[in-house]
Amino acid sequence: MTTPFTFDSASPRFGLPLLFAGQAQKEAHVNEAHALSDALLHCAIEGVANAPPASPVEGSCWLVGPAPSGDWAGQAGKLAARQAGNWLFIAAQDGMRVLNRATAQDMRYAGGWKTASRPASPSGGTTIDAEARAAIGQILTALTTAGLIPAA
């Protein structure tokens, strides 16, 4: 027979609260875990900001910028998810990916938030190849459409 697992009070990666036998107010812990899961599953942010929006929409999520203020003070680099009229802050973990709705671009976390930059379109040179430039332009358009690089 295997030894049963022993858990701390929260999951190690995202701090999802765990239940224990005989625990009072289990619904508070379950609801918090569901709120965190709801914010993290297929995460999409409205954009990056240093201050919370004046009229936040329930279920919206933002990436807190480097100089947060107001309700977001001290939460730089975290996700701020609006849940039940409050801000729920989630520390990023390596491997996280979010869709930034403001730029239509994917962002990935690996020791910090990373986004690809758009390479410059070809210009100049001694020999200009129109077909090669057209192909490069199509590649840039495809990468933009896929959300891998920002629009021009």
Image: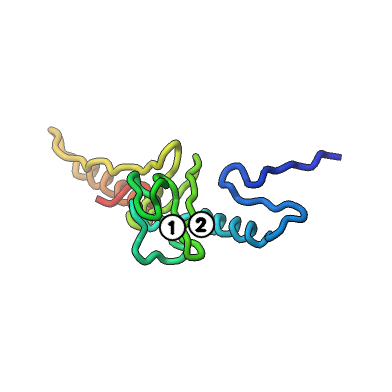
Distance CA(mark 2)–CA(mark 1): 7 Å
Element class at badge 1: strand
Seen at 16% across and 40% down, the residue is 123
Element class at badge 2: helix
Q: Toward the viewer: 77 or 106?
A: 77
Labelled disc at residue 146: none
Seen at 22% across and 43% down, the residue is 121
Q: Position of residue 56 (x, y in %)?
A: 39, 64
Pointer 2: what residue? Answer: 39
Determine which quarter of the picture holds residue 4.
Answer: top right
Residue at the limit of the structure toward the top, as seen here: 126
Q: Toward the viewer: 76 or 1?
A: 76
User: How busy is the neighbourhood of tag 1: few (under 14 within 10 Å), some, or many (20 plus)?
Assistant: many
Q: Are marks 2 and 1 in contact (CB under 8 Å)?
A: yes
Q: Is residue 132 above or below residue 80?
A: above
Query: Residue flagged by tag 1: what amino acid is it?
Result: Cys
Q: Toward the viewer: 25 or 97?
A: 25
The structure's colour scheme is: rainbow
Can residue 49 be seen here?
no
Query: Residue flagged by tag 2: what amino acid is it?
Result: Ala
Pointer 1: what residue? Answer: 61
- Total numbered badges shown on the rendered structure: 2
Q: Position of residue 120 (x, y in %)?
A: 23, 41
Can residue 37 be seen here?
yes
Q: Position of residue 36 (x, y in %)?
A: 55, 55
Seen at 40% across and 42% down, the residue is 113
Q: Position of residue 48 (x, y in %)?
A: 35, 52
Looking at the image, is mark 2 or mark 1 earlier in the sequence?
Answer: 2
Seen at 27% across and 41% down, the residue is 119
